[in-house]
Image: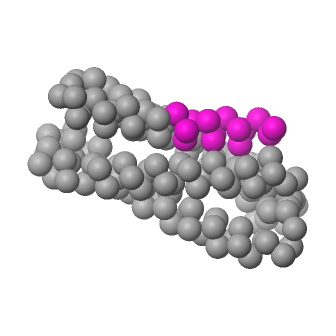
Amino acid sequence: MPFLPTISTLFIVISAVLVAIGWRLIVKGKPKAHKKTMISAAISALAFFVIYVSRTIFIGNTSFGGPEDIEVYYTIFLIFHIILATTGAIFGVATLTLALKRKIRIHRKIGPVTSIIWFFSAATGVMVYLFLYIIYDGGTTTSMIKAILGS
């Protein structure tokens, strides 16, 4: 198992688990525990993002190394995951900001939507990880810096 992709995927899984716990806490009427848990979920997601971006810039992204006849399906799945992850991140920042600004009425409306998007984003992210590193051998890896500088 590759070290950085495994660690970053672990952070996303932790983030999703914490969001589920946070959702349960608010349903049980424990707003302080909910807040701490959701902030922890956000920190875990941020740790994923920092590792992912750093790896993308300095080491690179791994291309699909599986059979060519399913590569198009993987690519469609990857695009779906990227859209979910981007949407989830935007909603996550907005939901967290609303909570911290005490705009709880709006936070309550978009929080569940954000959570569901985040769960699907995390699940599809784990699937991408499995396709790239566990089920199939990864393809080539090129860093953004090498791609830009032609090194």
- The answer to whether 9 is drawn above or below residue 91 in the figure is above
Taking the magenta stretch, the answer to whether it contains residue 4 is: yes
Residue 35: name its quadrant: top left
Q: How many marks?
A: 0
- x and y percent of residue 123 in the render? 56, 50
Which residue: 77% across, 35% down? 3
* Residue 70 figure quarter: bottom right
Question: In the image, is 70 to the left or to the right of 56?
Answer: right
Residue 123 in the magenta stretch? The answer is no
Decide if residue 60 is in sight here: no
Please identify the quadrant where the N terminus is shown: top right
Q: Quadrant of the C terminus?
A: bottom right
Give the x, y percent position of residue 73: 71, 73
3 vs 101, left or right, is right
Query: Magenta region: which residues?
Result: 1-14
In the displayed structure, 41 sits above or below 33; it is below
Looking at the picture, how far across and down is residue 94, in whole percent? Answer: 29, 52
Do we see residue 101 in this rendering? yes
Task: Please give the name of the residue rendered at 23% of the width and 33% of the height, measured from the top-left corner.
Answer: 26
31, above or below 97, in the image: above
How was this image coloured?
Answer: one colour
Q: In the picture shown, does residue 100 fall above or below 91?
A: above
Question: Looking at the image, which residue is at 17% across and 28% down?
Answer: 29
Percent across and percent down for residue 137 are: 88, 53
Please, what is the dominant secondary structure of the magenta stretch? helix
Residue situated in front as seen by the camera: 110 or 143:
110
